[in-house]
C-alpha cells in the first residue's frame, strides 16, 4: 500500500518531466567569494556571536582549566559534565586535582537512557570541543561523537566550548566542501551560533528557552589539548 | 480541512471577505501584526543592504530550486537510497491521511504515547496533533509560539511566527489559565521560563520526537533543520524515535546547495545571518554513540504537490522555501493577519498554494485577495512570480480549459459573469455593435440604475463611472477626423 504511494507519486512526477530545462549548473561565485583574511575571522566571529549573546573567554593551553573553573564558580555551577574518555576530561581532572571546593567534574559515560535524570535534573554545565568556527555567520561547528555526545551541548543550562582560533573558516559553503563532510556526513553535525533564544512573544528576544541559557566560547590558541592535534 | 468534506471554507458570509472585514475592525490584531511586520521588514532589509549581493544570491537560490525541480523524481529516489544507506527509513504518503497513518503506525509499533514536536508546516497540513490526540497519543508542540497557540486551541497565523497575532498580555492570561502553578506575569522572560519548565520535563519523558525538514540533501541523505530555540534539537535528539516530515519539494541535489538556501531563508524570514542552531542529521545513533535517536524515519508527503508539478507554469510554486517574506511585505496580509485566510499557508504564497492543494473551486476567493502590487514577488528569495500565478489561478477557477491539471479548474465559473464577458466581447468585436452600445451608453448611461447584486458590491468601494454625453468617436467625427 505504501509501496503503492511511492510508485504513484514518482510515476506522476516522471510523467510530468519536461527534460533538463532549468537544470543548468548554478553559479556559486557569490558564496565562494565570501572570504576573510585569517586575521579577521576570529574578530568577526566574536562580534557576531557576542551580538547573539554568546560570551568569550580568552585563555591559553596552560590557563584554560582555571579560566573555566573561575567562570563556573562565579556562575554558581555545582558541576560540569564532559565527554568520558576525552582528552579534555583528562586535562581538567589533572588540572583540578587537589584544588579545594569548586565544581564537580562529571562524565557522560553511559547511554542517555541511564543518564537522562541526571542530565536534565542536576547537570549545571556541559563542556565540549568543536571542529572550528565560521566567520561568515559567527557559528561554531560542533560534531558530536561517541566521546562527546549530542546532548552535552544542548541540555545543561551552560554550554562551554573550546575553540582554537586557527580552526575558524570562512563560511558553511567552504566547510561543507571539505572532504571531512563532502565524503560522508557524520550522523549529526551542528552549527551553534549563540545560546538558545526565542522571539515568539511580541518579537521580544528571550534567551535560554529550551537549550542552554549561556554559551561561553573559550578561545585557546593552539588548541586545548595540543597532543590531539587540531 | 479539505479531506473531510467540510463546506468550502472560503464561501459565503463566512468567507475571506467576512473574516478580513472582522480583522480590519480589530485594533488588537491590527496593532500586533503592524508591529511584527514592520520589525521583520526592517531586519530583512538590513541584511540585504547590498543590492548586487541580493541579486546574485537570489539568482543562485532560484537556480538551485529550478535545478532541483527539473530533476525532482530522480533526486527523491536518490534521497531515499542515501537515507536508507545511512539507516534512515523512508516512507511515502500521497495524502495527509496516509501520512497520519504512517506516523501513528510507527508510534504504535513502539508503544509510544508521548510525542514532542518541533515546528513543521507539513504537520499543520496533516492536522497531526488532532489526529494523534484522537488516537490516544499526546502530541505537544514545543516551539514557544506553537506551544502558545496549541494551548489556546488555535492555528498558526504566520508560518514563521505562529503566535504573532497575540500580545504578551493575552499570552500571560492564557498561561495563567492553562498552566498549573504559573504565577501571572507579563514579563517575556518569565513567560519563556514558564514554558521552559513545562517543556523540559516533556522532552525528558517523550517516547518520540516529530519534526519538519528545511531541506534534505539527496547526495548525502542528510536532513537539515534550522531553529533558534533548541526545541528542534530536543525533539530530534532526546527521544528514542525521531520522525521527520517533509513535503516532497524540500529535496536538494548536493550539500553545496544548502548554504545559499539557508542564508536566503534566515535573512528573508527573520533578518538573521544564521539561526542559533543548524542541525544536520544523517543517521540515527551510531554504534558507540551514547545518545541520539535509535531510529530515524522520514515521511515524504505529496498532498497535491505532484499535481502542481504537472503544470509547467504552476510548478514554480514548489520552489518555495517557506521563509514568509511574502507575507511580511504583503499590504493585505499585514492588515488582515493570517487567520483571515483560513488556510495552513496564509499570505501571498498561501493564496497560490492553498487553492492548488484544496481546489480552485473551493478556494477561489484566495487568488482574488490581492491587489497584485507585486511586493511579494519582489522579496521572494527564489524568484517565484507570485502575481503571475495569482492571475493564472483566477483564470483557472473561472474557465473550463481542456487539459487543465489544476484541481477544481472551472469550478468557480459563474454563468452571469461569463455572459457579461461574452456580451462585452460581442460589443467590442464589431464596429456596428460598438457604435450602438456607445450611443446607448452616452444617451442612457446617466439614467439611475438600481445598485443591486454585483453592481452594489462593485460600487461599494468605487465611484461608478459617468459616461460622457457624447462619445469620443462622435466628437472626433465632428472635428473632421476621418474614420480609419
Image: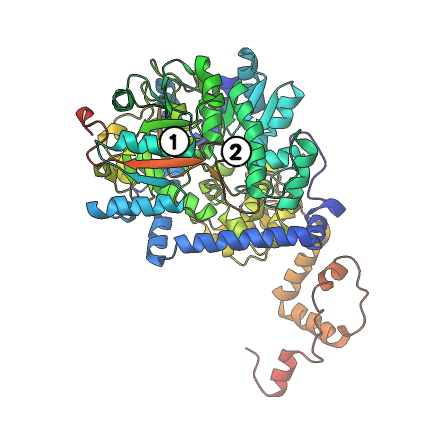
Q: In the image shown, does A211 or B279 lie closer to the viewer?
A: A211
Residue lying farthest front? Answer: A100
Residue that mark 2 sits on: B119
Tell me which corner region of the image, top left, top right, bottom left or bottom right, holds residue B402: top right
For mark 2, name the chain. Answer: B
Taking the image as shown, residue B220 lies to the left or right of residue B317, namely left
Residue B285, position in %: x, y?
Answer: 38, 17
Work out whether disc 1 and disc 2 sit on a shared chain.
no
Residue B312, position in %: x, y?
Answer: 46, 42
Position above or below: B424 against B481? above
Position above or below: A39 against B479? above
Taking the image as shown, residue B96 lies to the left or right of residue B377, namely right
Tell me which corner region of the image, top left, top right, bottom left or bottom right, holds residue B339: top right
Residue that mark 1 sits on: A73
Numbered circles on residues, count: 2
Residue A71, position in %: x, y?
Answer: 36, 34
* Image disc number at residue B8: none
Q: In the image shown, does B250 or A68 lie closer to the viewer?
A: A68
Q: SS class of the residue under badge 2? A: loop
In the image, what residue occupies the spot 62% across and 84% down?
B477
Amino acid at each position: 500500500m505504501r509501496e503503492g504511494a511511492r510508485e504513484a507519486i514518482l510515476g506522476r512526477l516522471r510523467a510530468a518531466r519536461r527534460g533538463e530545462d532549468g537544470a543548468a549548473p548554478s553559479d556559486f561565485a557569490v558564496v565562494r567569494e565570501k572570504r576573510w583574511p585569517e586575521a579577521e575571522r576570529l574578530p568577526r566571529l566574536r562580534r557576531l556571536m557576542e551580538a547573539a549573546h554568546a560570551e568569550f573567554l580568552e585563555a591559553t593551553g596552560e590557563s584554560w582549566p582555571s579560566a573555566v573553573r573561575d567562570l563556573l564558580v562565579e556562575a554558581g555551577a555545582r558541576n560540569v559534565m564532559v565527554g568520558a574518555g576525552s582528552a579534555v576530561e583528562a586535562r581538567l581532572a589533572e588540572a583540578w586535582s587537589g584544588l579545594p571546593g569548586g565544581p564537580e567534574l562529571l562524565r557522560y559515560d553511559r547511554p542517555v537512557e541511564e543518564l537522562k535524570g541526571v542530565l536534565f535534573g542536576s547537570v549545571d554545565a556541559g563542556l565540549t570541543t568543536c571542529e572550528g568556527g565560521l566567520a561568515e555567520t559567527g557559528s561554531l561547528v560542533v560534531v558530536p561523537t561517541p566521546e562527546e555526545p549530542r546532548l552535552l551541548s544542548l541540555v545543561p543550562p551552560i554550554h562551554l566550548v573550546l575553540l582554537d582560533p586557527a580552526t575558524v573558516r570562512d563560511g558553511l559553503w567552504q566547510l561543507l566542501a571539505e572532504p571531512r563532510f563532502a565524503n560522508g556526513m557524520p550522523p549529526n553535525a551542528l552549527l551553534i551560533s549563540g545560546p538558545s533564544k526565542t522571539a515568539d512573544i511580541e518579537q521580544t528576544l528571550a534567551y535560554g528557552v529550551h537549550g542552554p541559557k549561556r554559551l561561553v566560547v573559550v578561545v585557546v590558541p593552539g588548541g586545548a589539548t595540543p597532543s590531539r592535534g587540531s | 480541512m479539505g479531506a473531510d468534506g467540510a463546506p468550502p471554507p472560503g464561501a459565503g458570509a463566512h468567507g475571506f471577505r467576512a473574516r478580513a472585514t472582522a480583522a480590519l475592525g480589530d485594533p488588537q490584531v491590527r496593532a500586533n501584526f503592524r508591529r511584527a511586520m514592520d520589525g521583520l521588514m526592517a531586519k530583512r532589509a538590513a541584511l540585504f543592504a547590498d543590492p548586487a549581493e541580493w541579486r546574485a544570491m537570489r539568482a543562485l537560490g532560484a537556480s538551485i530550486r529550478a535545478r532541483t525541480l527539473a530533476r525532482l523524481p530522480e533526486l527523491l529516489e536518490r534521497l531515499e537510497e542515501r537515507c536508507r544507506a545511512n539507516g534512515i527509513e523512508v516512507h511515502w504518503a500521497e495524502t495527509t491521511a496516509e501520512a497520519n497513518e504512517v506516523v501513528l503506525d510507527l508510534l504504535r509499533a513502539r508503544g509510544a504515547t508521548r510525542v514532542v514536536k518541533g515546528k513543521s508546516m507539513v504537520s499543520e497540513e496533516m492536522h497531526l496533533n488532532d489526529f494523534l490526540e484522537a488516537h490516544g497519543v499526546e502530541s505537544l508542540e514545543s516551539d514557544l509560539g506553537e506551544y502558545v497557540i496549541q494551548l489556546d486551541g488555535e492555528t498558526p497565523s504566520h508560518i514563521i511566527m505562529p503566535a504573532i497575532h497575540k500580545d504578551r498580555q493575552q499570552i500571560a492570561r492564557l498561561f495563567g489559565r492553562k498552566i498549573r502553578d504559573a504565577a501571572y506575569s507579563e514579563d517575556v522572560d518569565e513567560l519563556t521560563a514558564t514554558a521552559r519548565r513545562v517543556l523540559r520535563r516533556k522532552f525528558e519523558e517523550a517516547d518520540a520526537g516529530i519534526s519538519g525538514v528545511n531541506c534534505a540533501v539527496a547526495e548525502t541523505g542528510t536532513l537539515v533543520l534550522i531553529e533558534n530555540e533548541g526545541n528542534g534539537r530536543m525533539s530530534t535528539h532526546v527521544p528514542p524515535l525521531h520522525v521527520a516530515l517533509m513535503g516532497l519539494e524540500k529535496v536538494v541535489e548536493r550539500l553545496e546547495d544548502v548554504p545559499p538556501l539557508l542564508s536566503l531563508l534566515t535573512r528573508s524570514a527573520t533578518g538573521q545571518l544564521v539561526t542559533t542552531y543548524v542541525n544536520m542529521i544523517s543517521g540515527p545513533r551510531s554504534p558507540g554513540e551514547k545518545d541520539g535517536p535509535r531510529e530515524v524515519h522520514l515521511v515524504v508527503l505529496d498532498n497535491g504537490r505532484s499535481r502542481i508539478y504537472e503544470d509547467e507554469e504552476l510548478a514554480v510554486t514548489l520552489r518555495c522555501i517557506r521563509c514568509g517574506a511574502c507575507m511580511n511585505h504583503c499590504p493585505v496580509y499585514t492588515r488582515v493577519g493570517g487567520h483571515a485566510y483560513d488556510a495552513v499557508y496564509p499570505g501571498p504564497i498561501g493564496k497560490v498554494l492553498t487553492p492548488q492543494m484544496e481546489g480552485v473551486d473551493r478556494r477561489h476567493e484566495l487568488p482574488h485577495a490581492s491587489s497584485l502590487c507585486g511586493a511579494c514577488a519582489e522579496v521572494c528569495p527564489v524568484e517565484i512570480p507570485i502575481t503571475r500565478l495569482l492571475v493564472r489561478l483566477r483564470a483557472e477557477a473561472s474557465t473550463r480549459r481542456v487539459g487543465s491539471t489544476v484541481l477544481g479548474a472551472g469550478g468557480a465559473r459563474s454563468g452571469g459573469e461569463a455572459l457579461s464577458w461574452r456580451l462585452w466581447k460581442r460589443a467590442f468585436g464589431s464596429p456596428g455593435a460598438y457604435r450602438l452600445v456607445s450611443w446607448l451608453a452616452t444617451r442612457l448611461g446617466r439614467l439611475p440604475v438600481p445598485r443591486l447584486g454585483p453592481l452594489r458590491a462593485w460600487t461599494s468601494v468605487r465611484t461608478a463611472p459617468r459616461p460622457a454625453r457624447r462619445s469620443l468617436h462622435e466628437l472626433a467625427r465632428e472635428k473632421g477626423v476621418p474614420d480609419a
